[in-house]
Image (spheres, helix red, strand yellow):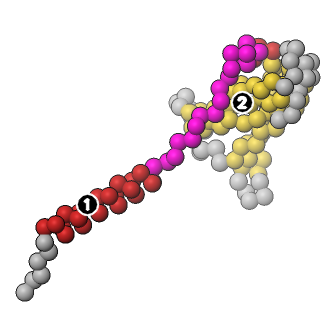
């Protein structure tokens, strides 16, 4: 003789399973972080006073055997304001012009005075293999004034 499960118990079990499935789905979705701050109106105007120079790219092997791509260069503040921080968006593309990596990195972490030039070094590890091996696009993403 088979046991019979009453309809209300069956409904509760189905709702519990559906609820757990919904919770699992929501918990497994990537959490979206707030977008990083963008250029203020003052920063958009000031960008023309910043100059990147001697920008070069090289690849080296890390102690683990992974390839590290480094972008080195200099930034000059040709304006009349002291800057506390400057960040770049580095955009890497594949041979078809599709973005394979976009990373926002600081190139100035301490003050840079008017007329001053500072060197920067940006190491990247784990760039997708579909990258076209060309210099990434470098776009000033944020400027913080002193």
The disc at residue 78 is none
49 over 88 or under it: above or below: above
In magenta, the rendered stretch is 29-46
Residue 72: where, in percent of width, then height?
81, 34
Q: Is residue 104 visible?
A: yes
> Does 43 lie within the magenta span?
yes
Disc 1 vs disc 2: which is toward the camera? 1
Q: Say which element carries label 1.
A: helix
The image quadrant of residue 127 is top right
Quarter assignment of residue 44 = top right
From the viewer's perspective, is 119 left or right of 94?
right
Image-quadrant location for residue 107 = top right
Image quarter hosting the N terminus: bottom left
Kindly state the secondary structure of the residue where label 2 is placed.
Answer: strand
Callouts 1 and 2 close, C-beta under 8 Å: no
Q: Please tell me which residue is depicted at 82% across the width and 32% down the height of the picture.
A: 108
Count of residue discs: 2
123 to 1, vertically: above or below: above
Rendered residue at 86%/34% (across/down): 110
Which residue sits at x=80%, y=19%?
Answer: 50
**Mark 1 to mark 2: distance in Å?**
49 Å
Q: Closest to the observer: 87 or 111? A: 111
Q: Which residue occupies the foreground of this view, 51 or 41?
A: 41
* Location of residue 63 with respect to 110 vertically, above or below: below
Q: Which mark is residue 15?
A: 1
Q: Mark 2 — residue? A: 88
Can you see residue 134?
no
68 left or right of 91 in image: right
- The picture places residue 96, in percent across and down from the top left corner, at 52, 30
Q: Position of residue 47 (x, y in %)?
A: 75, 17
């Amino acid at each position: 003789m088979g046991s019979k499960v009453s309809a209300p118990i069956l409904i509760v079990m189905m709702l519990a399973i559906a609820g757990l499935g919904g919770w699992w789905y929501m918990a497994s979705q990537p959490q979206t972080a707030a977008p990083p701050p963008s250029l203020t109106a003052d920063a958009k105007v000031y960008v023309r006073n910043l100059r990147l120079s001697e920008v070069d790219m090289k690849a080296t092997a890390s102690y683990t055997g992974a390839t590290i791509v480094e972008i080195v260069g200099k930034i000059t503040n040709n304006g009349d304001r002291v800057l506390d921080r400057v960040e770049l968006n580095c955009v890497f593309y594949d041979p078809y012009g599709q973005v394979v990596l976009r990373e926002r990195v600081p190139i100035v972490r301490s003050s840079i005075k008017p007329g001053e030039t500072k060197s920067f070094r940006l190491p990247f590890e784990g760039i997708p293999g579909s990258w076209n091996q060309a210099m990434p696009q470098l776009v000033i993403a944020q400027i913080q004034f002193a």
